[in-house]
Amino acid sequence: MRAEPPGPRHEWLDDEAGPVVRPYAVTGGRVTSAAGDFDLVAFVLATRDTDPDDHPHLHPEHRHLVELAVEPVSVAELAAHLDLAVGVVRVLLGDLLTGGLVTVHEPSSTAFLPDDNILKAVANGLRAL
């Protein structure tokens, strides 16, 4: 049987998971990325020959992001893999982008999407079938 640790119990302690770290602690209190905002479907890719061990200043979350980005992966997928809020992942990605450890490939501009009238005409044509 496990003995209770001495001292008061806090709501952020979980016997199964250990202490819970608040998102602002992971980002150092920052809520915006220094490198700008990243689209949810933007692809992140670690730069060639990036070894997180060569950068001792990186936090574990930074290291995990670099490891996951060996293959192209979206910002949304990274947030899901790390079980972190997208805003937190965006701040961490900004750090990595500024440090040259990852590249971020934003999706094409919406200027290349078809006109709404064309989409409506296609939808109406499909309904007519």
Image (cartoon, rainbow, N blue to C red):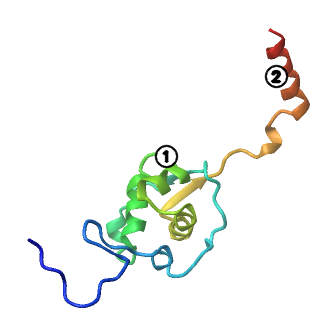
Mark sitting on residue 72: 1
Residue sitting at x 12%, y 79% = 3
* 105 to the left or right of 72: right
State the image coordinates of residue 2 (x, y, percent, origin top left). 12, 74
Q: Earlier in the sequence, mark 1 or mark 2?
A: 1
Q: Quadrant of the C terminus?
A: top right
Residue 25 visible? The answer is yes
Residue sitting at x 53%, y 64% = 93
State the image coordinates of residue 49 (x, y, percent, origin top left). 39, 56
Mark sitting on residue 118: none
Q: Nearer the viewer, residue 83 or 115?
A: 83
- Relative to 62, does residue 40 appear above or below in the rendering? above
- Relative to 29, does residue 86 appear above or below in the rendering? above
- Relative to 37, does residue 31 appear above or below in the rendering? below
Q: Nearer the viewer, mark 1 or mark 2?
A: 2
State the image coordinates of residue 21 (x, y, percent, origin top left). 40, 75
* Label 1: element kind: loop
Q: Quadrant of residue 38?
A: bottom right
* 68 to the left or right of 103: left
Mark 2 — residue?
A: 123
Q: Residue furthest bottom?
A: 7
